[in-house]
Every structure is written in C-alpha cells, then in structure tokens.
Image (tube, helix red, strand yellow):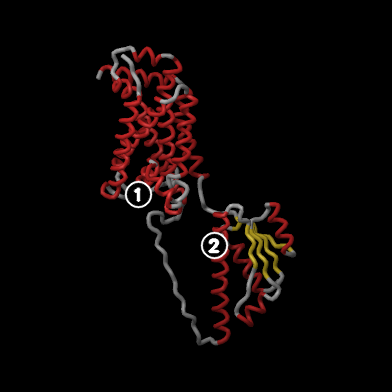
C-alpha cells in the first residue's frame, strides 16, 4: 500500500508540475464545453428566402407576411422573376426560392386550390428537410385561414369543424437543444481527456527510459498500474464535477435524478476508459502512436454513440456495432438520469454492461503489460 501511495503522490506532483498539463486538464475542457454546447446544434434558424411573386395580390402578400413573421426566417426578399432567385441559390446567397404563380388568388377563389413552387438548396439534406417542414407548416396555416374565410363568406351559418392539438413536451419543455446536447458533450470531454492522458502516461515513461528502471525494481505489476492510473481516475471525477456545475449554472440543464448515481456510474466508466488507455499504451512505443490510436477509436466511438445522430436511425448493422461502444451507454445513462430522473432500476442494464466492459478490458490491459523482474 505504501508503494502505491508513493507512486500516486509522485504522479500528482508530476501533473501539477507541468503547466501545460494543467491547462489541458482544467482549462480546455471548460472552454470546449462552453463552445461546443453552443455550436453543436441541429436547430435550423436564419433561413434565407427569396420570393418571386407573379401574382402581386392580397392573398400572395398575406402569404409573404406569414414568412416574414416567422422567427426562423432571417431574410425574406422579393425578386422580379424565378431566374433571379435561382441565380442567388447558385451563388449561395439564399437557401430557398419560392415562386407564387400569376393566377394564385384567382385559383384560390374559384377552385379552392393552387400550387406554389419551392426550390431548396439540398446540399445538406437534413437541413433541407427541416426547411421544407417549416415552409409546409406555414402554407398549411395559411390554407386553414383561407378555408375559414371562404366558408364564412359563402354562408355565415357554416362553422368549419376544427381539431386543435395541445402538445405537452416532457423532459425538455422549452425544446432547448442545449438541454439535450450538454450532457452528451460532457461525457465526450470526460472520455477524451482520461483516455488520452492514460494512453500517453506509460508511453511517456518508455520514451524517457524510466520504465526500464521501474521494471527492475521489486514493485509489483498491479501496484505500478494502480499508482499510475489512480490520479487520472480522480481527475476524471473532478472534470465531471466542473462540467455538471457549468451545465447547471450556464446552460440550466435540469438535474432530476440522483447525482450520486451519476458519480457511481462515472467511477466505473472511468475504470473502463483508463484500462483501455493502458491497453493502448502497452502496444505503442511513442506518445504520437498512442495519440493516433486513441483518436482513431474516439472518432468511431463519438460518431456511433448517439451523441449527434440517433442510433435508431442508423442501419441495423451499425446499431449492432454500437453495442460495443462504451460512450453510447454513458450518453444514454446521463441523459436518462439528468433529464428524465431515472433511478437505478432504469439504468441497471447500462451499469451492468459498463461494469462487464471495465472488468474485461482491465484484465486484458494488466495481462498485456510486460514487466520483467
């Protein structure tokens, strides 16, 4: 035990002696959480719309006003013809071109139906789909108003039947995307920092030549590994604490569940990540190699974690691959606990899987660590 405490003390001194390491551990995660949480959003806003109004009627002007009144459209500009709008679309100065035909109002009054042409820049297919939904909703609302006005004009006794929906949004009543993203980004930062630091830690000893000196000492393998990794386990919990404080104070993320459950899960999760970092360091000779391998796995873990893309929308084979992704289970867990107030029973499957992964990877990591007495 004294040997382990000595190694832990030595590691903490080394960490706090290195000023660049301190900035990496404490300042960068805070900045990343603040920046990424504001930048990583799928909300589609500031849509630029160009309208070619061939009708110039009261009905077409009323439709245009619907677009101008919508907060998602930052620019609603009229042009004399559709070709001008298409030219702007090609230049990238507009996102949507809408053509209102010449007989727009007349067809509405006589036939109760008409068409408008909508051209959308679909380089980003997801954004284009959201823009199409917004436009469709505005047109449908305009249609409802026209139908009500027409029925009242024809017969004041007729009152059209209407079904009104009153939505109730659970867990994120304001539909704030940051509420959804911040917990996941916090998981990402805790994982990246602890993985990179643990992966490069023992490799650094190899580069300095001190690992060979340690190997010929009577220090046992498990004592050396525990002493080297325990400081980063503590730092991971500290980063989690700082991240939770920022999430609550800056982003007002609700924390409905038991915070102690979050720390308990994170403590086991960090054992998994540190074991994985140790496994990487055992099979690399330089810090650059360790960094590249760790980053290779991190990219896969991030993209297939459900952080940015819902797992349910992935192909079946990809969904099966995500079952081996530890970040997936942590992202699911922290969102369930913080946003939905889930208890131990609801998150028990995630906890069991992470515990199994942590045990397995640490067994492989300790087994693969070579120490000659």
The residue depicted at 40 percent of the width and 45 percent of the height is: 322
Vertical comparison of 300 with 364: above or below: below
Disc 2 designates what residue?
A: 133
| 197 lies left or right of 351 | right
Residue 192: % across, % down: 44, 34
Position of the C terminus, as image quadrant, is top left
Vertical comparison of 321 with 366: above or below: below
SS category of the residue bearing label 2: helix
Residue 197: % across, % down: 42, 28
Residue 50: % across, % down: 67, 60
The residue depicted at 29 percent of the width and 39 percent of the height is: 356
The residue depicted at 46 percent of the width and 79 percent of the height is: 161
Q: Is residue 74 visible?
A: no
Disc 1 designates what residue?
A: 336
Q: Is residue 11 visible?
A: yes
SS category of the residue bearing label 1: helix
| 264 lies left or right of 28 | left
Vertical comparison of 37 with 9: above or below: below
């Amino acid at each position: 035990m004294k040997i382990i405490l000595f190694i832990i003390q030595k590691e903490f001194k080394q960490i706090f002696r290195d000023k660049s390491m301190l900035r990496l551990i404490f300042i960068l995660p805070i900045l990343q959480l603040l920046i990424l949480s504001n930048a990583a959003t799928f909300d589609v806003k500031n849509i630029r719309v160009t309208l070619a109004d061939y009708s110039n009627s009261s009905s077409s002007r009323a439709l245009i006003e619907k677009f101008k009144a919508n907060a998602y459209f930052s620019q609603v500009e009229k042009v004399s013809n559709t070709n001008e709008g298409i030219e702007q679309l090609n230049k990238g100065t507009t996102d949507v071109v809408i053509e209102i035909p010449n007989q727009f109002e007349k067809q509405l009054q006589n036939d109760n139906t008409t068409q408008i042409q909508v051209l959308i820049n679909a380089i980003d297919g997801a954004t284009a789909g959201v823009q199409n939904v917004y436009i469709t909703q505005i047109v449908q609302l305009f249609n409802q108003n026209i139908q009500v006005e027409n029925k009242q004009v024809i017969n004041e006794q007729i009152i059209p039947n209407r079904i009104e929906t009153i939505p109730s949004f659970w867990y994120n009543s304001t539909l704030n995307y940051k509420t959804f993203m911040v917990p996941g980004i916090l998981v990402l930062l805790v994982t990246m920092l602890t993985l990179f630091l643990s992966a490069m830690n023992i490799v650094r000893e190899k580069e300095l030549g001190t690992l060979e000196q340690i190997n010929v000492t009577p220090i046992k393998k498990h004592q050396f590994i525990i002493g080297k990794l325990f400081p980063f386990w503590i730092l991971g919990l500290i980063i989690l604490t700082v991240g939770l404080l920022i999430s609550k104070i800056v982003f007002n993320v609700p924390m409905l569940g038991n915070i102690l459950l979050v720390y308990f899960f994170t403590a086991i999760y960090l054992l998994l990540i540190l074991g994985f970092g140790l496994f990487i360091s055992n099979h690399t000779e330089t810090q650059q190699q360790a960094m590249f391998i760790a980053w290779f796995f991190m990219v896969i873990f991030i993209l297939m974690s459900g952080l940015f893309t819902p797992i349910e929308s992935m192909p079946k084979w990809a969904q099966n691959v995500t079952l081996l992704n530890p970040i997936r289970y942590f992202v699911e867990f922290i969102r369930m606990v913080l946003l939905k107030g889930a208890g131990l029973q609801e998150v028990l499957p995630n906890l069991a899987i992470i515990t199994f992964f942590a045990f397995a990877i640490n067994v492989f990591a300790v087994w693969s660590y070579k120490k000659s007495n």
